[in-house]
Amino acid sequence: MTTDIKVKGPASYFPSIEKTYGKPVAHWLALLDTVQDRKHMEQVAFLKAEHKLGHGHANALVAYHKAGKPA
């Protein structure tokens, strides 16, 4: 018997992020390591301005990164 586990929260955006921007989630999390001293919305703004991510995708990556969960 198989059970489908539904991914919830910020990680639910990861397949779309990888498909849309052509880079693995680990790439974006490594970029966030370089600005980890900034506030949440400052990190979101960084991803949007410097890397052209959409708001929802940027916000999901930052939330996941700040929660300290491994990719």
Image (spheres, helix red, strand yellow):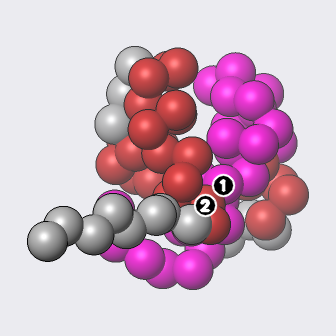
Q: Give the range drawn in magenta.
A: 45-71
Q: In this image, 17 relative to 37: left or right?
A: left
Residue drawn at x 45%, y 53% is 29
Quadrant of residue 57 within the rendered picture: top right
Instruction: Give the residue type that dot 2 points to.
Output: Pro
Secondary structure at numbered mark 1: helix
Check the image and name the residue furthest to the left.
Answer: 1
Quadrant of residue 45 within the rendered picture: top right
Q: In this image, 66 relative to 22: left or right?
A: right
Residue drawn at x 54%, y 54% is 12
Instruction: Give the residue type that dot 1 points to.
Output: Ala
Residue annotated with mark 1: 60
Callout 2–callout 1 Cβ contact below 8 Å: yes
Residue annotated with mark 2: 10
Position in image of residue 42 (x %, y %): 83, 54
Q: In this image, 16 relative to 4: left or right?
A: right
Task: Work out whether residue 50 can be spotted.
Answer: no
Is residue 66 highlighted in magenta?
yes
Q: Judge by depth and name the residue closer to the eye, 41 or 21.
A: 21
**Count of labels in the image:** 2
Position in image of residue 26 (x %, y %): 34, 48
